Amino acid sequence: MKYFFKIISYIFHPVFIPTIITGCFYLLNADFFIPIERYLATGQAFLMTFLLPVCIYFFLKSLGLLKSSVMIKNLRERSAPMFLNIVIINILIFKIWENASNSSLKVFFIGYCISYTILFFGILLKRKYSVHVASVCSAIPLFVNQTTTYYLNPFYILPALLLIIGLVATSRLYLRAHTNVEIIVGALIGFVPSFILFYKM
């Protein structure tokens, strides 16, 4: 069981989430975007939010500035990667996707960035909330918005999302990476900013 939950933690690692969500967004809304736009935006999300942070992680590790594994259990070592992710996501939203037509996805990433900023300040205050759970919970308002805007079937999208959230939260608890409170607060940090932004839309 331990290996199963480790696999879940790696598959839904925060560094994968933006690419997974971008890919799912374009897959579900394939009729509304031309193929080149879908592939280009997903590729850009992959390069900026996965490949670049991973390269930075190994660069910092080679300099001896990071000693933890990719899960970065050390609270002190979390601040630099978290801050860099905030900067990278802002570049993606406001520079690379400046003229893109994926407005809902941009709103999601703005909410995601706000969640990361809150988590970053939490780290400065020596509070370790679940970035895994925050990342997956931030997707709920996006996909609820998609089911109402594009009339997608909510009866397979939302249960699948809730199942993933449940598996991720359970894996973090089972592996003793977080306490119940850290999981719940992480979920709220991920969900609330995106919910407010989509509600205002």
Image (spheres, rainbow, N blue to C red):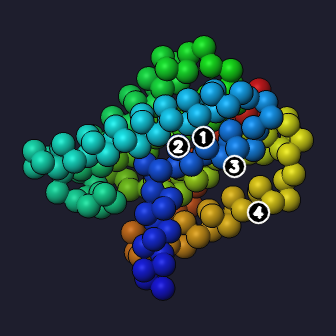
Name the residue type under label 1.
Thr
Task: Please rate how many residues cluster around mark 4, counting C-alpha atoms within 10 Å: few if below 14, some from 14 to 19, many from 20.
Answer: few
Task: Please rate how many residues cluster around mark 2, counting C-alpha atoms within 10 Å: few if below 14, some from 14 to 19, many from 20.
Answer: many
Task: Please rate how many residues cluster around mark 3, counting C-alpha atoms within 10 Å: few if below 14, some from 14 to 19, many from 20.
Answer: many
Marks 1 and 2: CB-CB under 8 Å?
A: yes
Name the residue type under label 3.
Ile
Q: Say which mark, if any, is on residue 22.
A: 1
Mark 3 and mark 2 lie on one chain; the one further toward the N terminus is 2
Measured as percent of width and height from the top left, residue 178 is found at 43, 67
Residue shown at 34% from the left, 37% from the top: 52
Viewer-nearest of discs 3 and 4: 4
Query: Is residue 4 depicted above or below 145 in this figure?
Result: below
* Residue occupied by mark 4: 159
Marks 3 and 2: CB-CB under 8 Å?
A: no
SS at mark 3? helix
Name the residue type under label 2.
Pro
* Residue occupied by mark 2: 18
Viewer-closest of 144 and 45: 45
Quarter of the figure with the C terminus: top right
Residue placed furthest toward the top? 99
Marks 3 and 2, how far apart in space? 13 Å
SS at mark 2? helix
Viewer-nearest of discs 1 and 4: 1
